[in-house]
């Protein structure tokens, strides 16, 4: 009896369970969580406003969440992290500029942008999925260059598109769209302010978090549907999936379509919360932050879940929110972008070089 715990389990069994729980959560995530706690303590010592930091964490968590969810269909279908996310993002931006040109405002403008952007992204995702099937095994490398190429090509589009809204075109010349377009009079904050409330000085963007939660549930349900399970089989073992009668190429295309559609909706949510629409080179590196978030959440190059997306988004955005003001006070001013690039690229480098990166270890 001395060898038994209060719940009747042997000491050795409890120790194994604890080790297994630590292994499941991941040593890197424990380190990152510890680093986040250290940053929060430093922020408190330096006199930074904790309610403001916590409110910013919740907002950035909600505004970036769907962009991270867009990684799941791509990874699960076997094409790896979606570095061509700017393709779907630009479709969402096109839809938002069109809503401004049509003089739409409020929730209707937001829903139109999300819906029409998802439609455009679905079409673009289909053609890119066909292209991906031609370059199997090189999706991440090719996707990165395709994403950069799409952003560069859209720079030409933004200068030539025949929109006439004075909110978007350059004041001199009367043609071409501006680099940054405000959404203040359109649909900025339409989700953030919906059912929002304050708790001890912390503003909770209820509508934004509920919208993200809705897409988490939809993604979770889809990945447990017949099509979602077939997609996971293709991603984990394409040869076995093919021998089981599954159309591997079709499911890879479907993963591309869903990923780009989520990216289009995600950028609309991001812009709604941010309050501005960034054109030209704005979407260039957004895929890297989304990839870093899903990987920091525990995803591998062949397996990703909604839980990975939620944990990764929270950890990554929390570190960015807290580390930037702390770094600016401790080291020097204007280090926000430097810190963001170091953290995101460091996480991606770790994930791509660890031993189990190329195989599904779960």
Image (cartoon, rainbow, N blue to C red):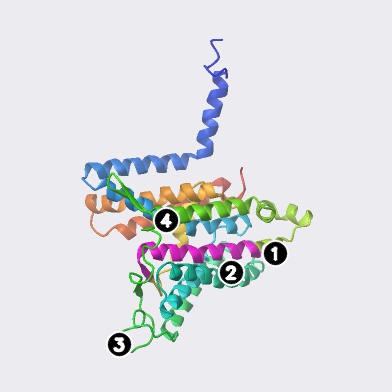
Between residues 104 and 21, which one lies in front from this camera angle?
104
Between residues 306 and 205, which one lies in front from this camera angle?
205
Of the residues under marks 3 and 1, which one precedes in the sequence?
Answer: 3
Give the distance between the C-alpha atoms of the residues marked 3 and 4, in whole angstroms: 38 Å
Most distant residue in the bottom direction: 173
Residue 163 as seen in the image, left or right of residue 182: right
Residue 202 as seen in the image, left or right of residue 295: left
Residue that numbered label 2 is attached to: 122
From the viewer's perspective, is the residue at label 1 or at label 2 nearer? 2
Q: How many other residues sit within 10 Å of disc 1, few (<14), some (14-19) or many (≥20)?
A: some
Give the distance between the C-alpha atoms of the residues marked 1 and 2, in whole angstroms: 14 Å
Q: Which residues are magenta?
A: 253-277
Residue that numbered label 1 is attached to: 250
Residue that numbered label 4 is attached to: 207
Residue that numbered label 3 is attached to: 172
Report the predominant secondary structure element of the magenta stretch.
helix
**Screen quadrant of the N terminus:** top right
Where does residue 278 sit, x and y in percent of width and height?
Answer: 38, 71
Residue 269 located within the stretch drawn in magenta: yes
The secondary element bearing badge 4 is classed as: helix
**Displayed quadrant of residue 128:** bottom right
Where does residue 321 sit, x and y in percent of width and height?
Answer: 33, 52
Most distant residue in the top direction: 1
């Amino acid at each position: 009896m001395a060898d038994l715990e209060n719940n009747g389990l042997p000491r050795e069994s409890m120790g194994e369970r604890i080790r297994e729980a630590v292994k499941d959560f991941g040593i890197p995530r424990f380190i990152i969580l510890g680093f986040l706690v250290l940053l929060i303590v430093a922020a408190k010592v330096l006199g930074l406003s904790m309610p403001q930091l916590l409110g910013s964490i919740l907002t950035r968590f909600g505004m970036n969440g769907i962009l991270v969810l867009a990684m799941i269909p791509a990874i699960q279908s076997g094409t790896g992290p979606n570095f061509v996310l700017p393709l779907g993002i630009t479709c969402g931006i096109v839809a938002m500029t069109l809503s401004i040109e049509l003089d739409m405002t409020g929730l209707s403008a937001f829903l139109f942008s999300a819906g029409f952007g998802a439609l455009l992204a679905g079409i673009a995702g289909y053609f890119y999925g066909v292209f991906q099937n031609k370059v199997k095994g090189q999706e991440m490398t090719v996707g990165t260059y395709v994403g950069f190429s799409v952003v560069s090509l859209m720079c030409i589009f933004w200068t030539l598109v025949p929109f006439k809204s004075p909110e978007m075109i350059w004041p001199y010349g009367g043609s071409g769209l501006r680099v940054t377009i405000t959404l203040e009079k359109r649909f900025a904050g339409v989700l953030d302010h919906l059912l929002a409330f304050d708790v001890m000085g912390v503003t909770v963007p209820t509508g934004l978090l509920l919208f993200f939660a809705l897409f988490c549930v939809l993604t979770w349900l889809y990945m447990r549907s017949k099509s979602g399970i077939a997609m996971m089989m293709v991603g984990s073992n394409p040869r076995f999936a093919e021998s089981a009668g599954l159309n591997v190429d079709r499911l890879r295309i479907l993963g591309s379509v869903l990923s780009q559609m989520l990216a289009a909706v995600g950028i609309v949510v991001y812009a709604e919360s941010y309050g501005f629409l960034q054109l030209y080179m704005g979407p260039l590196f957004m895929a890297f932050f989304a990839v870093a978030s899903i990987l920091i959440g525990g995803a591998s190059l062949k397996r990703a879940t909604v839980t990975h997306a939620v944990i990764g988004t929270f950890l990554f955005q929390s570190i960015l929110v807290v580390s930037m003001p702390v770094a600016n006070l401790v080291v020097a001013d204007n280090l926000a972008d430097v810190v963001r690039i170091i953290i995101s690229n460091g996480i991606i480098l770790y994930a791509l070089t660890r031993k189990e990166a190329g195989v599904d270890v779960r």
